Image: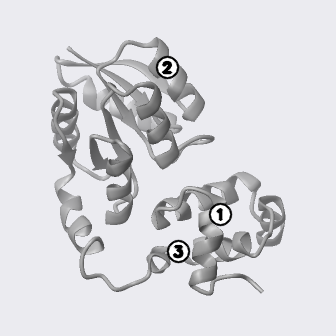
Amino acid sequence: MIRILIADDHAMVRGGLKQIIATSDDLRVVGEAVDGASTLAEAARTPCDMLLLDMNMPGLAGIELIQRLREVHPALPILILSMHNEGQIVTRALKAGAAGYVTKGSEPEVLLAAIRRIADGGKFIDPSLVEAMVFDGGGDTRAPHDALSERELQILKLIAGGSPLGRIADRLHLSPKTVSTYKMRLMEKLAIDNNAELIRYATKHGLIAE
């Protein structure tokens, strides 16, 4: 029996995953988490054979959460299940310590195959991501920030210009949580881990807001 811990902040997603997993007699969900803190807590107290992890959750998330999990639970295999299909993000997650990566748009059979492969000590990349990884890591001459949405680029410029997230939220008529989510996503796309790197990147590419 493969014991699975699910970490995703959306109840409907967790419910759908449990339904898919329930179709297989050799798989069982033994725990759920809704953010970075609860993921670390559940991984510490719930015996499991693998973690099915969303990249975008409140609090500690994404690459930083993967790295933290590898530090405190080095033997726990991590399978990323994410809405992001950019090759750079996939590569970054794997380098951080994830054993596999599947998109939320994949067929259930792909997810189940990935779970079994990861739990058995193997690696798994969603077949639909292979082309993106090849081209994102190869001859693509675009700058990384060309992959950002218009809103993500706007927030990048404002952060690099020294604006606090609260002021950005007021200026763009968004909630602070929404601005934080945009920041997390743009940092993942740029493979950046902290504000200092973000500012250096923006300065290098002339992206400081006036």
| Residue at x 24% of width, y 74% of height | 135
Q: Total label count?
A: 3
Which amino acid, by three-letter code, is at mark 1?
Answer: Ala
**Mark nearer the N terminus (3 vs 1):** 3
User: Label 3, on which residue?
Assistant: 149
Q: Is residue 185 left or right of residue 161?
A: left
Q: Residue at x 75, y 56 (%)?
A: 175
Of helix, strand and loop, which one carries label 3?
Answer: loop
Residue 205 location, x and y as percent? 56, 84
How would you rate the neighbour count of disc 3 (Cα within 10 Å): few for under 14, some for 14-19, many for 20 or more?
Answer: few
For badge 3, the amino acid type reads Ser
Lateral position of residue 26 relative to residue 184, left or right: left
Q: CA distance from mark 2 to mark 1?
A: 31 Å
Amino acid tagged 2: Glu
| Residue 183 coordinates in the image, percent (x, y) | 62, 61
Image position of 33 with respect to 93: above or below: above
**Label 2 vs label 1, nearer the camera:** 1
Q: Secondary structure at mark 1?
A: helix
Which residue corresponds to mark 2?
A: 42
In whole angstroms, how far apart are the C-alphas of marks 3 and 1? 21 Å
Q: Which residue in the protein does label 1 denote?
A: 196
> Is the Cβ of the residue at disc 2 closer than 8 Å to that at disc 3?
no
Q: Judge by depth and name the residue closer to the eye, 104 or 204.
A: 204
Is residue 159 at least partly visible in the picture?
yes
Q: Name the spot of residue 2 as percent of width and height, x first.
A: 23, 19
